[in-house]
Amino acid sequence: MTSHLSQTKRTSGESSSEVVSWQAEMKRAIRSSSDLCEYLHLNPEEVGSAENDFPVFVPLSFAARMQPGDPQDPLLLQVLARMEESVEVAGYRADPNGEAHAGLSAGILQKYASRALLISTGVCAVHCRYCFRRHFPYADAPSGMEQWKHSLEAIASDSQIEEVILSGGDPLVLSDQMLGQLLKKLADIPHLKHVRIHTRTPIIIASRITDSLLAHLNSTRLNIWFVIHANHARELDGEVLAGLSQLQQIGIPVLNQAVLLRGINDSEEALYQLCKRLMEAQIIPYYLHQLDKVAGAAHFHVPIERGRELIAAIRKRLPGYAVPRYVKETEGEPSKTVLA
Ligand code: SF4
C-alpha cells in the first residue's frame, strides 16, 4: 500500500524545485516515528523507535536532508522518538531548570536585570527529542495579543528593561501579521531598544523567511537580533543559508546556539564543521549548551570533560570568534555557567 508519505517524498530536497509555503510545510509534517521510518526506509523495530506523549513532528523540508537507510543520521537522531526515552535515569527531571517555579509556564514572563523573556507561543516547527521544555504544558502557553497583554504591560511598567527575548515554543511559527502586531506593540514601549528572536524555524523550514516577515523586521525602530539553533553542519544547506542571508542583508545579526548531543555533534570533526559552516555564512557560533537533564533525553548526554576537550580541539583550528562559549544552565542561577 502506498501511504501519503510516498507521494510527498523529498519535495524540498534534490528532486524538486517546488517552493512550498512554510504553513503548508507545517501542515504536512511527519507526525509519528513509524511514518518517519517509512519515509527513510528504516525498520522501526530495528532502530528502536517509539511513540510517546511528546509526539514526533518533523517537516518534510528537514526530513529531506536526512540520509535514507541510515539509522545514525545526525539529523534523524535529533527528532526520532526512541525506546530509550522511556527509561528513567536518576537526576533527569521533567523541569530540569525549575522554570515552573520561575513562573514561565503560567506567568509567561521572566525578568532579568535589563531583559524580559516573553513566551510568544507554545508551538514549534519541529520537536527536538532533547528539548528541555519537552514536558511543558505548552497547550496553555499564550499565543495572541489578548494573552500577551499582561506581559506587555509588565514590560512597559519597568523602564529598566531594554531588551525583550521572544522565545517559546518558537516565535516564528506565528503568522507574519501576528509578529508584526507584536513588534509594533513592543516598539511603542519607549525604553525598549532590542528584540531578540530565538528560533529554530528557519533551520527547519527555509521558506519561513518571507518577504512580509522581512518587511516587518525592517520597518521597526527596534534593533532585531536572531539567535538560531542548529546542531550539525548538515542542517545548514543552501536554502537555509539563503534565507538567513536575507536577514543579514537587512542588517540583522544572526547568532547560533547548539546543544552538545551524543552521536550528533560530540566529535571534533562534527563540531568543527558546524562552526566552520556558520563562520562561512557570517553567523556567530554563540553558545554550545551542555544538555539539560530533562527526563527522556539521558541518551544524549555527553560528559562535561568531553565537551571541554572538544572545545580545546576546535580552538586550535578556528579563530576565537568562531569558537562557541560552552555553557550550562543551573537551576536558580540568573546566568549561565561558562564551562569553557
Ligand atoms: S525548537 Fe527549541 S523549543 Fe522547540 S522543541 Fe526544539 S529545542 Fe525545544
Image (spheres, grey):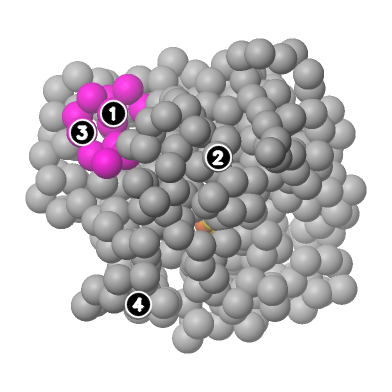
Q: Is residue 267 one of those drawn in magenta?
A: yes
Bounds of the magenta span? 263-274
* Residues under numbered marks 1 and 3 in contact, where contact means CB atoms less than 8 Å apart: yes
Look at discs 2 and 1 and give the one toward the viewer: 2
Q: CA distance from mark 2 to mark 3?
A: 29 Å
Residue at numbered disc 2: 38
Residue at numbered disc 1: 270
Q: Which comes before the other along the chain, label 2 or label 4?
A: 2
Residue at numbered disc 4: 93
Q: Is residue 198 one of those drawn in magenta?
A: no
Q: Viewer-proximal residue, 310 or 93?
A: 93
Residue at numbered disc 3: 267
Horizontal placement of 48 versus 142: left or right? left
Amino acid type at image mark 3: Ser
- Identify the element where label 2 is drawn: helix
- Disc 1 packing (10 Å; few <14; some 14–19; many ≥20): some
Q: Residue furthest bottom?
A: 101
Amino acid type at image mark 1: Ala
* Residues under numbered marks 2 and 1 in contact, where contact means CB atoms less than 8 Å apart: no
Q: Which comes before the other along the chain, label 2 or label 3?
A: 2
Q: Which comes before the other along the chain, label 2 or label 1?
A: 2
Q: CA distance from mark 4 to mark 3?
A: 27 Å
Q: Which comes before the other along the chain, label 1 or label 4?
A: 4
- Disc 4 packing (10 Å; few <14; some 14–19; many ≥20): some
